Image (tube, rainbow, N blue to C red):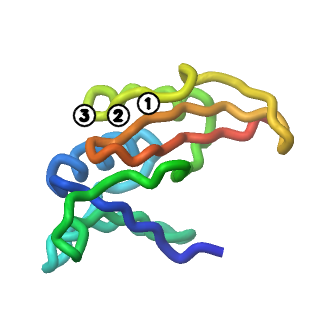
Amino acid sequence: MFSHIMVGANDVAESKAFYDATLGALGHAPGVIDDKGRCFYMTKTGIFSISKPIDGEPACNGNGSTIGFAAENTESADNWHSAGLANGGTTCEDPPGAREGTTGSLYLAYLRDPSGNKICALHRIA
């Protein structure tokens, strides 16, 4: 359904360090900076990217928005969360852990990136 997601960043280098660490904890390669200063993380299933807003205004988070990254297991979700905290992220929501939802059992870990975007690592518990 989705081809890509791009979030705004006030400091692309700081955000790249954060996402290199968090996405690296999920097994993804470091991001690649293009000639316009944007950073791209490319996978077979889609692209995640960070960029300074093109209108020149400061980046801000979307109230009510969350971007979820798939985690293979609970350990990788915990490693993702720890890497984020060690690289400029802040915790939000409840601590990482299992939750029951309408779609089944989930293991969730939430962070805000250095620009305030709300992100999540999600593992579906069998």
**Vertical position of residue 102 compared to residue 34: above or below:** above
Crowdedness near tag 3: few (<14), some (14–19) or many (≥20) residues, C-alpha within 10 Å: some
Q: Is residue 68 left or right of residue 49?
A: right
Please tell me which residue is depicted at 50% across the width and 27% down the height of the picture.
78
**Vertical position of residue 74 compared to residue 119: above or below:** above
Please tell me which residue is depicted at 51% across the width and 34% down the height of the picture.
110
Q: Which residue is mark 3?
A: 88
Query: Which corner quadrant holds the C terminus?
Result: top right
Among the 4 quarters of the image, the one containing residue 95: top right
Q: Is residue 62 left or right of residue 8?
A: right
Please tell me which residue is depicted at 22% across the width and 75% down the height of the picture.
55
Crowdedness near tag 1: few (<14), some (14–19) or many (≥20) residues, C-alpha within 10 Å: many
Whole-percent x and y of residue 104? 84, 38
Q: CA distance from mark 2 to mark 1?
A: 5 Å
Q: Amino acid at mark 3?
A: Gly
Q: Secondary structure at mark 3?
A: loop
Whole-percent x and y of residue 31? 28, 60
Q: Which residue is mark 1?
A: 81
Q: Amino acid at mark 1?
A: His
Among the 4 quarters of the image, the one containing residue 34: bottom left
Q: Nearer the viewer, mark 3 or mark 1?
A: 3
Q: CA distance from mark 3 to mark 1?
A: 11 Å
Residue 99 image label: none
Q: Are marks 2 and 3 in contact (CB under 8 Å)?
A: yes
Whole-percent x and y of residue 97? 63, 22
Q: Which residue is mark 2?
A: 84
Query: Is 26 or 84 nearer to us in this picture?
Result: 84
**Vertical position of residue 74 compared to residue 32: above or below:** above
